[in-house]
């Protein structure tokens, strides 16, 4: 296998991973709400946006749980991208 072929396969794999991550992150981010400019998970237990977006589908109590710094950073990028696309 040539270096070029390996590079193309690597790019394809990265593209598939990033696309799947983006779709999943947008779905999980829909479970986030904002109060006073700060993002919170709507239900307990809290979900996560890193390393792979997951939403806890366990039926939990209604609670506001503050996002950690990493999830907050990712959420703000998603929110920024959505606002840019809607203009």
Image: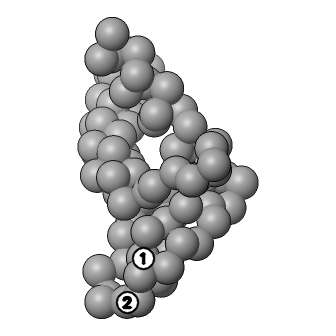
Colour scheme shown: one colour
Outermost residue to the front: 36
Q: Is residue 60 above or below residue 2?
A: below
Q: Quadrant of the N terminus?
A: top left
Above or below 20: residue 47: below
Q: In the displayed structure, would residue 54 be above or below residue 75?
A: below
Residue 74 place in picture, x, y as percent: 56, 43
Which is more N-terminal, label 2 or label 1? Answer: 1
Q: CA distance from mark 1 to mark 2?
A: 6 Å
Q: Quadrant of residue 23?
A: top left
Residue placed furthest toward the right: 69
Tell me the element at label 1: strand
Location of mark 1 (residue): 43
The x and y percentages for residue 71 are 59, 54
For residue 60, the mark is 2
Going 53% across and 33% down the picture, which residue do you hit?
77
Residue 17 in view in this figure: no
Instruction: Give the residue displayed 63% in from the left and 49% down from the top.
Output: 36
State if disc 2 and disc 1 touch (CB < 8 Å): yes
């Amino acid at each position: 296998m040539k270096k070029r072929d390996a590079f193309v396969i690597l790019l394809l794999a990265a593209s598939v991973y990033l696309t799947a991550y983006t779709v999943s992150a947008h779905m999980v981010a829909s479970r986030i709400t904002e109060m006073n400019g700060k993002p919170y998970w709507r239900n307990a237990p809290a979900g996560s946006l890193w390393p792979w977006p997951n939403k806890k589908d366990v039926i939990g109590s209604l609670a506001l749980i503050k996002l950690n710094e990493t999830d907050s950073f990712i959420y703000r990028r998603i929110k920024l991208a959505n606002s840019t696309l809607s203009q």
